[in-house]
Image (spheres, rainbow, N blue to C red):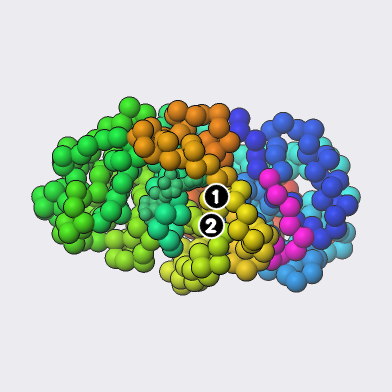
């Protein structure tokens, strides 16, 4: 079993340390981050996609209830467990109405905490698993778009190497090169496509899987590629409607559809963003990129894509005079993963046409790509219906349970 990924949110450092200490003894549980208030909780959930948030009630800047409301709305697959002090029954009811899954009254024992986390996680997994019993994560197909505001920031490098790692994790993966003018996935993989998405687009508007696959090239890593057109002028032959049809079909036949993009908010990219369950926005630590990423995040918010967006910092080890913390503060968004700079490995991999996760699996940069791949594998995507289910069952449980004043902690399963 992969460890349950926990975010601990409490304004008291000692409490966070105690929880960390208690949970460090359990190999099924991993603390992946900490927050000091509701605002940090929201940011860290976006960036880290935890399975469970342990949330304090009263905190500066934004309290736990308001934070939970926002978290559940934007990240319906995340479960919140409240940690409260005695006498906050009224608050607890509000917390549950905000979508919390359970609560513990301080002081609680280590066993109580571990047992509650595991129970909530199992319950949540059953809900997010669409009725089958294979593992704890959703088996829903995922469309993952790698996006960026700038050319050369590392989108294709990250897209290709994560796609290969997904295939290494035994997933069925197709890459779609939506950089329709200058797409270079084929170069990264040393492939020479004869047929591309441009010719496929000429076939008519509603292709089936056999037709699409006849335009794809297999790579020895196990992934398949739907290549970009051979010439930039063919890009305009392809409409957003055709892209939508192609992705819709591929989604039904692959575990992961990984989409590489040009740095534009154009029709085809907007279509990819709409259809994606996860979007990785790649950035580097220079002022122009940060300014443009900030604008992009605002646009993603307007387009309602912010809940599925994660930031990946590329060339993190280069000293550009801007600190990661400062960038995060400016962006009001946390960076979910970082890749070091390694020109030697990257350029040599590109020139040989062999992704570095294959030729240099133990290099630091390959290990760093694994973090991105893990984020993709762990993501539960959008399950907006969960909020209503969760609220319904929680309220039912609460009101069945009798007077709030007598409730010390919520009853067991919530079902
Ligand atoms: N972490 C890194 N360290 C060093 N070099 C890198 C790193 N990531 C990418 N590169 C190099 O930077 C160049 C641009 O990378 P890549 O093609 O992935 O960017 P891109 O965002 O897809 O660009 P475009 O918008 O032009 O498609 C390539 O030569 C690649 O090898
Ligand atoms: Mg590219």
Q: Is residue 108 left or right of residue 339?
A: right
Q: Position of residue 71 (x, y in %)?
A: 61, 61
How many numbered circles are shown? 2
The residue positioned 64% from the left and 61% from the top of the image is: 321
| Rendered image: mark on residue 132 | none
* Viewer-nearest residue: 404 or 222: 222
Q: Residue at x 46, y 71 (%)?
A: 299
| Disc 1 C-beta below 8 A from ligand 1 | yes
Residue 110 appears left or right of 240: right
Q: Is residue 363 magenta?
A: no
> Farthest residue toward the left?
203
| Position of 290 relative to 311 (above/below) | below
Where residue 343 sits: x, y (%)? 50, 42
Which stretch appears magenta?
A: 32-40
Please tell me whether residue 408 is drawn above or below residue 60 in the rendered image.
above
Please state the horizontal and vertical placement of residue 293, each as a whole percent of the image.
50, 65
Residue that numbered label 2 is attached to: 284
Kindly identify which residue carries mark 1: 315
Please give the name of the residue rendered at 38% of the width and 61% of the height, measured from the top-left corner. Answer: 263
Could you tell me which secondary element the residue under label 1 belongs to? Answer: loop
Mark sitting earlier along the chain (2/1): 2
CB atoms at circles 2 and 1 under 8 Å apart? yes
**The one of 227 and 362 positioned closer to us in this rendering:** 362
Does the numbered disc 2 mark a residue whose Cβ is under 8 Å from ligand 1?
A: no
Secondary structure beneath label 2 = loop
Q: Nearer the viewer, residue 145 or 107?
A: 145
């Amino acid at each position: 079993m992969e460890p349950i990924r926990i975010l601990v949110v409490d304004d008291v450092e000692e409490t966070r340390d105690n929880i960390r200490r208690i949970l460090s003894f359990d190999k099924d549980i991993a603390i992946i981050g900490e927050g000091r208030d509701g605002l940090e909780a929201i940011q860290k959930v976006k960036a880290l996609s935890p399975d469970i948030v342990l949330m304090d009630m009263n905190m500066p800047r934004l309290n736990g209830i308001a934070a939970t409301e926002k978290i559940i709305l934007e990240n319906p697959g995340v479960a919140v467990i409240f940690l409260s002090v005695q006498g906050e029954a009224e608050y607890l009811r509000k917390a549950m109405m905000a979508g919390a899954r359970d609560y513990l009254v301080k002081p609680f024992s280590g066993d109580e905490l571990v047992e509650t986390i595991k129970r909530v996680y199992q319950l949540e997994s059953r809900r997010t698993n669409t009725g089958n019993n294979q593992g704890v994560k959703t088996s829903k197909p995922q469309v993952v778009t790698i996006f960026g505001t700038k050319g050369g920031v590392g989108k294709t490098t990250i897209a290709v190497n994560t796609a290969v790692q997904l295939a290494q994790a035994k997933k069925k993966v197709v890459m779609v090169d939506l950089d329709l003018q200058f797409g270079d996935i084929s170069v990264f993989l040393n492939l020479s496509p004869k047929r591309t998405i441009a010719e496929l687009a000429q076939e008519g508007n509603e292709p089936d899987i056999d037709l699409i696959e006849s335009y794809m090239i297999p790579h020895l890593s196990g992934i398949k590629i739907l290549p970009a057109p051979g010439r930039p002028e063919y890009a305009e032959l392809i409409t957003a409607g055709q892209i939508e049809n192609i992705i819709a079909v591929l989604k039904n036949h692959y575990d992961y559809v990984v989409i590489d993009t040009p740095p534009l908010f154009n029709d085809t990219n907007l279509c990819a963003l709409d259809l994606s369950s996860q979007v990785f926005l790649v950035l580097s630590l220079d002022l122009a990129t940060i300014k443009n990423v900030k604008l992009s995040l605002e646009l993603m918010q307007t387009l309602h894509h912010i809940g599925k967006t994660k930031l990946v910092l590329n060339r993190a080890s280069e000293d550009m005079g801007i600190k990661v913390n400062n960038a995060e503060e400016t962006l009001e968004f946390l960076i979910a993963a970082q890749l070091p700079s390694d020109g030697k490995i990257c350029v040599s991999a590109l020139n040989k046409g062999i992704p570095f996760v294959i030729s240099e699996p133990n290099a630091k940069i390959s290990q760093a790509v694994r973090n991105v791949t893990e984020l993709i594998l762990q993501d539960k995507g959008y399950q907006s219906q969960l909020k209503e289910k969760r609220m319904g069952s929680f309220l039912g449980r609460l009101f069945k349970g009798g007077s709030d004043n007598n409730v010390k902690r919520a009853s067991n399963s919530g079902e």
